[in-house]
Amino acid sequence: MKNIFKHSLLLMGTASLMLVSTGCKKNFTNPNAATSDQVFSSATGLTGVAVSLQRTFALGRAGSLYNMVAANGFTTGELILLNAGNTAEYQLSVGGGSVDGTNSILANIWANANKIEYDANNVIDGASKLNDKNYASGLIGYASLYKALALGSLAMYWEKVPAAIGTNATFVDRKEGFNRAIATIDAALAAISANAISAAFTSNVPAGNDIVNSLQALKARYALFTGNNALALSAANAVDLTKKSTMNYDAVSLNPIFETATSTNNVFQPVDSTFGLPVGLAPATNDRRIIFYTSINPTVAPRFRIAGFGASSATAFPIYLPGEITLIKAEAFARTNDLTNALIELNKVVSKTAATDPFAVGANLPALTGTFTQAQLLDQIYSNRCTELFMSGLKLEDMRRFGRAITERKRNLFPYPFRERDNNKNTPADPTF
């Protein structure tokens, strides 16, 4: 993320756009700051704001990524708490009514999603007016990617989501949040199809992000979540599974899982080699994904430690995994009762070796053989999603979609942050669990 910091001065000029006046009635102009018109009418200014979207999503304990991994991990049994003094994490580890609108992890996911959507909308609107359409398509694709991730984060964790950004926004069913993410992706893909992303744009944003593949992967993910299996399958087929798409880190911009949890051993660690799955669905002891995602400390508790995508300060975090896309295909086939193709796709993940996966995630198990019912195949797909996508933030959505027993999770959906409730009269009632 080194390029994030190249644009830091540009971002200073946009900070005033994010502030909401709460009492002061006077407005002051900083003669040294760029105006909003200047920022959103130039390619340079728009690029600075676009790069800040990744920063909001991917950096630090307050960023979306850390908070999604933590909220999902505690709620679904992937993680264990090491220090009850981490109040927000403690609430989620207990679950139920202990989780309320004061929870800072949930507040961060909510606030970041709204900020990203607001900024992304400005970037997309500004980019559409640029003369350089190839540079503009890069801006639109990049901003749309993070807007889609933001919309998806709200829809995965809350029963209803804001219909739009604004004061006293109304709320819609969370499925509509996924559909809005898909519509955002479709508009971006159309812009890129009309005008290919220029090399000039790619050189001005953080390395690692394959925009087109990421957009198709997220479209497949969210289509699956809405039950649109045909769309999920077609989008998944458009993803190049040999390519990687990542959020990169370095000595200045640290991997947030490593920074907060791995390096301190004071917040959370993996539960154990079961990955929080019940008997019959937990990975086999010879599943090589166990040693990818966890390491063993033989002397200092806890025994199981974070590895995988939180292993070091510079470990890149995937926007999607090729294995996720293959499992999307398997599930889409299974839910439409095409069990032959479902098993073929599932076995691609079951038998995959680390050497043949771009991220070195491989179970290296014998392919499944025999005859399976639809229910049996779906159980196997769920088990492999939970193992292949461990600590990705996706398991809670999977648990609901696969109809797992409510006793296997500590919350079904989350309460709304008090900050939203206190400032928006349309905030819905909290779910009971």
Image: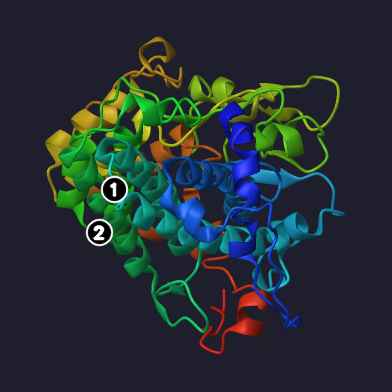
- Nearer to us: label 1 or label 2: 1
Which color scheme did the rendering employ for the protein? rainbow
The C terminus appears in which quarter of the rendering?
Answer: bottom right
Q: Residue 33: x percent and y percent?
A: 65, 53
Q: Tag 2: residue type?
A: Gly
Which residue, given by chain and number where applicable, does mark 2 sit on? 227
Residue located farthest toward the front when viewing the structure as drawn: 31
Quarter of the image holding residue 266? top right
Instruction: Work out whether 3 lies above or below 194.
Output: above
Residue visible at 65% across and 32% down? 255
Give the secondary structure at mark 1: helix
Please give left or right for residue 335 compared with residue 366 in the image. left
Can residue 145 be seen? yes
Residue 110's x, y, as percent? 57, 64
Q: Which residue is mark 1?
A: 219
Q: Residues within 10 Å of mark 1 (few under 14, many from 20)?
A: many
Marks 1 and 2 sit apart, C-alpha to C-alpha, by 12 Å
Q: Is residue 27 left or right of residue 392?
A: right
The answer to whether residue 70 is seen in the rendering is no
- Quadrant location, the N terminus: top right
Give the residue type at disc 1: Lys
| Vertical side of 113 occupied by 3: above or below | above
Of the residues under marks 1 and 2, which one precedes in the sequence? 1
